[in-house]
Image: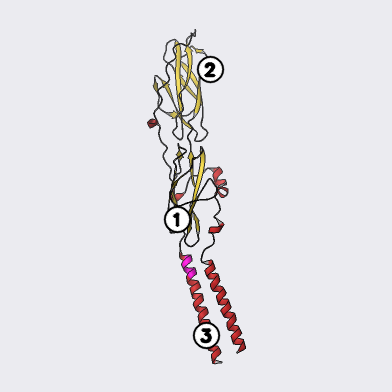
Amino acid sequence: MRKKKVVAIFVLSMLAAMLSSAFTILSVRTSETSPIIMIIHPQNTTYTVSTGIPLTFTIDASIVWIGYSLNGQPNITITENITLPTLEDGWHSVVVYANTTYGELTASTVRYFTVDTTAPTGSIKINDGEVSTISTQVALSLSAEDATSGVAQMRFFYYNYTDWEDYSTSKFWVFNPGDGYKYIYVQFRDNAGLLSSPYRAHIFLGTAPVSDTTVPSAPVTITPEETPQPTPNTPEKGDAQKTPEEEKQLEETTPSPLSSQSLPDYVPELAGMIIVMLLVSAVTVLILRKR
């Protein structure tokens, strides 16, 4: 009888030690905080280039794998900061993923940005396209389009450029007095800061139009340095502005974690310990029954 007690105490001590080890493993694993992935670039803004946009980020933990997903596509494995591939005009999104040493797959927040490399286009008419007028005051009909960022401003050239003003489809204009052809140019600017070509319209001021032989030269093309660059709107804590359509499609555009990376590596270890404990318990019961 005394031997049974000794054996039972020994087995219970082993089980207690193994349980203590299992709880230690669990506490160490669960005490590890999830890594924070911060995307630095691209920023939540509009880029006027389609190539050379960087993907830079920071991760505050040890990792064994890094990848990124562009526009909801499958993850692409990387090892460091990279340059994104050539992008088309329009909205884009990017997510960075990282796998820690404990098998935990973590994702950054979705970063949205826009690429706009196409300048706006437009047109101008005077008095709905009439050939002549007897009044120096005329009505300008304006039209402009920009598929990506939208038309923001316009300015006019009549001897000199006027200041930029908000885009509108109509405007009153007063020419200098004196019979003859009167010319005016308009230039448009989109929300990305891209400038259109100057567009011209003319009308004869007076009662007897003559041949149009005094067409002035077009305004001097504006140099790139005069094109204002958009101010980045960097979101707080990695958050980004989203359009309503993208908010609705967020679950569809965010790729699911890779299943091969989602199983913590300590699960087999705990499973093995549990199996050993069950075997030891079974053997102990058999020994006690025989005695």
Residue that mark 3 sits on: 9
Q: Closer to us: mark 3 or mark 1?
A: 3
77 vs 215: above or below: below
Q: Residues within 10 Å of mark 3 (few under 14, many from 20)?
A: few
Q: Is residue 27 magenta?
A: yes
Q: Amino acid at mark 3?
A: Ile
- Mark-to-mark CA distance, 2 and 1: 61 Å
- The residue pinned by badge 2 equals 129
Task: Give the main secondary structure, helix, strand or loop, of the magenta stretch.
Answer: helix
- Callout 2 crowding tier (Cα within 10 Å): few <14, some 14–19, many ≥20: few
Q: Which residues are magenta?
A: 25-30
Residue 244 lies in quadrant: top right
The residue positioned 57% from the left and 50% from the top of the image is 251
The label shown at residue 36 is 1
Q: In 3D space, how far apart are the residues under numbered discs 3 and 1 (Cα atoms)?
A: 47 Å
Q: Does 260 sit left or right of 81 as displayed?
A: right
* Nearer to me, 242 or 289: 289
**Residue 158 shows up from this direction:** yes
Query: Residue at horizontal 45%, vertical 55%?
Result: 36
Find residue 245 and report its horizontal and vertical position in percent: 56, 43
Label 1, secondary structure: give it.
loop
Q: Of label 2 and label 1, which has the lower sequence position? A: 1
Say if 252 sits above or below 139 in the image.
Answer: below
